[in-house]
Image (cartoon, helix red, strand yellow):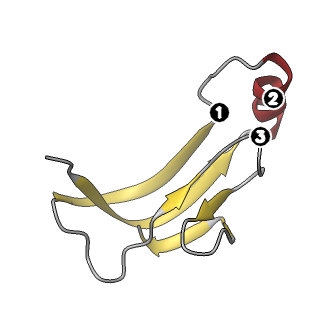
Amino acid sequence: MLRRLEVRDCTFRVSERRRQAVIRTGQREVHTWVACTLITDSAVPPDEAMDFTYNPCHTPTFTRLCDCAPIWAASTC
């Protein structure tokens, strides 16, 4: 069963220097993270939850899945 984490006060971080290295070499490496407060893990996301994604070759930021808008912070994810 796929579980989801409910987190609050999210800040999305991307190391641009390491992102450029990933693009240049094609080698995957950790260069992004989300600083947040863990609330709970749940099978059902809260109504205000936001789905997001990240692809270093497409954009230098995390983006919302619903409209591809860049995000840097969120109250609930």
| In this rendering, position of residue 43 left or right of residue 61 | left
Q: Closer to us: mark 1 or mark 2?
A: 2
Mark 1, residue position: 31
Q: Closer to us: mark 3 or mark 1?
A: 3
Q: Residue at 62% across / 75% down in the picture?
A: 67
Residue 25 place in picture, x, y as percent: 80, 16
Cα distance in 3D space between marks 3 and 1: 13 Å
Mark 2, residue position: 23
Q: Residue at 43% across / 57% down in the picture?
A: 36
- Above/below status of 44 relative to 14: below
Residue 35 place in picture, x, y as percent: 49, 52
Label 1 Cα crowd, 10 Å radius (few <14 / some 14-19 / many 20+)? some
What amino acid is labelled 1 in the image? His
Cα distance in 3D space between marks 1 and 2: 12 Å
Task: Examine the image and state in which quarter residue 12 appears.
Answer: bottom right
Quadrant (top left/top right/bottom left/bottom right) for the C terminus:
bottom left
Q: Secondary structure at mark 3?
A: loop
Disc sitting over residue 39 in the figure: none
CB contact under 8 Å: marks 3 and 2:
yes
Q: Earlier in the sequence, mark 1 or mark 2?
A: 2
Disc sitting over residue 57 in the figure: 3
What amino acid is labelled 3 in the image? Cys
